Image (cartoon, rainbow, N blue to C red):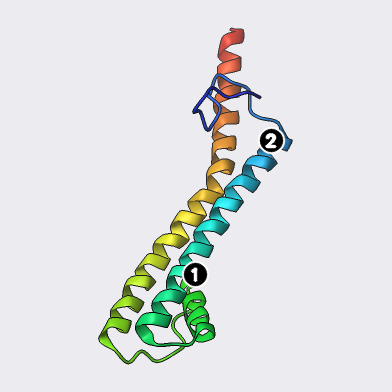
Amino acid sequence: MVLNSGQIWEHRRQAPISPRAFVGRMLEQGRLAVAIIALSVLFGVMGYHWLAGFGWIDAFLNASMILGGMGPVGELKTNAAKIFAALYALYAGLVFLVVGGVLLTPVLHRVLHRFHWESDQAANEK
């Protein structure tokens, strides 16, 4: 399956990609999701370390807990730390939605592509 230059997904007139290529696409999207999560954890760790004064391990714990949707662990003493924690929690909610979208996009595209490709094939046979 060769896509046009700059084309990410196959056009509806093109046949769906092979199962092997689809697995490759899912792995690529998985790598993107892991990169987003890793950068988000790094951002949170630095914020909790520098603004809240937590040690690296405690900063990692708090960033991971917020990003995972569990909530904060340590007590925040400064206003800057509290503002950072609030903004990071809002950011973490958006990261959850973005990562979900990144991982579901190939699956939804494949389902919709197969549906449209088959209906186009049936229309062409008439």
Kind of element beneath mark 1: helix
What residue sits 60% from the left and 52% below the top? Answer: 31
Identity of the amino acid at label 2? Ala
What residue sits 52% from the left and 24% below the top? Answer: 5
- Residue 4, compared with residue 111, is above or below; it is above
Q: Residue furthest right?
A: 20
Q: Horizontal placement of 44 versus 107: left or right?
A: left
Q: Quadrant of the C terminus?
A: top right
Q: Residue furthest left?
A: 79
- Residue 19, compared with residue 104, is above or below; it is above
Categorize mark 1 by other alpha carbons within 10 Å: few (<14), some (14-19), many (20+): many
Q: Nearer the viewer, residue 29 or 48?
A: 48
- Quarter of the rendering containing residue 106: top right
What residue sits 67% from the left and 41% below the top? Answer: 24
Identity of the amino acid at label 1? Val
Q: Which mark is residue 21?
A: 2
Q: Which mark is residue 85?
A: none
Kind of element beneath mark 2: helix
Position in image of residue 115 (x %, y %): 57, 29
What residue sits 65% from the left and 47% below the top? Answer: 27
Position in image of residue 109 (x %, y %): 54, 37
Q: Of callouts 1 and 2, which one flags the residue occurring earlier in the amino acid sequence?
A: 2
> Of discs 1 and 2, which sits in the foreground?
1
Q: Nearer the viewer, residue 28 or 10?
A: 28
Tell me the CA gap for discs 1 and 2: 30 Å
Q: Quadrant of the N terminus?
A: top right
Position in image of residue 95 (x %, y %): 44, 61
Q: Residue furthest top?
A: 126
Categorize mark 2 by other alpha carbons within 10 Å: few (<14), some (14-19), many (20+): few
Q: Which mark is residue 41?
A: 1
Position in image of residue 119 (x %, y %): 57, 21
- Residue 94, compared with residue 3, is above or below; it is below
